[in-house]
Image (tube, grey):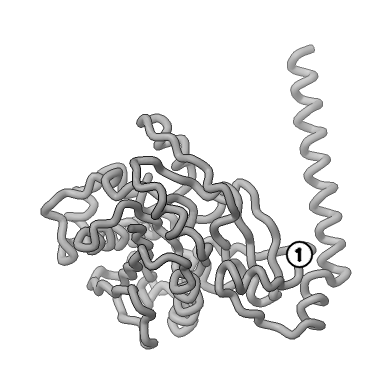
Amino acid sequence: MLAFITSLRHPQNSADYRRVEELLRLTLASTANQTSDDYVVIVVGNVRPSFELPPRVHFVPVDFPAPAPPTGPRTDRAPFVWDKGTKIGIGLAAAREHSPDHVMIFDADDFVHRDLAAFLAGRRDDRGWVVDRGWMYSRSRNAYRAQNAFNRICGTCHILPYSAYGIPDDLAVTSTQEQVAAAFGERLEAMLGAHHGAVEWHAARGRTLHAIPFRAAVYHVDTGENHSGKAMTGAARPYGRSLRRDFAIDASLGAGATWWSALRPAAIAQSVSDYASRNRRRAARFARRVLVRA
């Protein structure tokens, strides 16, 4: 069984908590779209969602304090990792009763491929997996693009054996944040609260994360609630039906508005400018290497 685990930010640290709930509702449509029933979804948060949760989704309430003053979703990294990591720790404790083989920690505004549970159902071993190729998607533009090095920019990117987390038997869904932090130690940041450098972190400890052989997740940007504040700039692909088939993402704009949003002249000009900038940086790096060798 695959356990999908996510956390919701504290209402105080959002721009609009109704928007946070709407993003979660869209995200859970993708987990409910799985082609295999061999999965469970755990959502941990301070406030139970106001909409009816899909089947196989379990909400776990916590009363953790807001990690930062009410300044919106873009908090400093340390309180963000603390809040997310301790909530994910509670989610791992809650998943215990379902006896999952694997765990995928996902962000509550992203989307997961419909075949993930089926893919893992045939691989009940101790391998870990990484989504190194995925998609970036903007609902406000109804457009998307292929995203390589996906795990470098999006937290919905790792699948690990449940046993890899080393969850203490006495960790409970009623544990405090301090108890969760003590239970996981350095793993709180490296495995639960952040994703940058996780492949290298696991490799240094003897675990190789294998690449999932398809684009298995969608990084949702331009939401107004991203901690990163990430936006999609430049030209992109207009909405395609594969988004609905694979990720349960419905179109947000009509056909004409979609094509204009994805490929308007300003977007194309931005892509050309970005391409030129990348080439200049590559040329500068190459010149520096040549000078050093000389």
Residue 68 shows up from this direction: no
125 relative position to 256: left or right? left
Does residue 50 lie above or below 154 as drawn?
below
- Left or right of 281? Residue 101 is left
Q: Position of residue 41 (x, y in %)?
A: 35, 68
Element type at marker 1? loop
- Could you tell me which residue is drawn at 63 percent across and 59 percent down? 135
Q: Amino acid at mark 1?
A: Ala
Where does residue 228 sit, x and y in percent of width and height?
A: 54, 61
Q: Determine the residue positioned at 78% across, 27% down.
A: 286
The local crowd at label 1, few if under 14, some if 14 to 19, many if 20 or more residues have their Cα within 10 Å, is many
* 292, above or below 71, in the image: above
Quarter of the figure that contains the C terminus: top right
Outermost residue toward the left in this view = 170
Q: Position of residue 84 (x, y in %)?
A: 36, 60
Query: Which residue position is annotated with label 1?
Result: 236
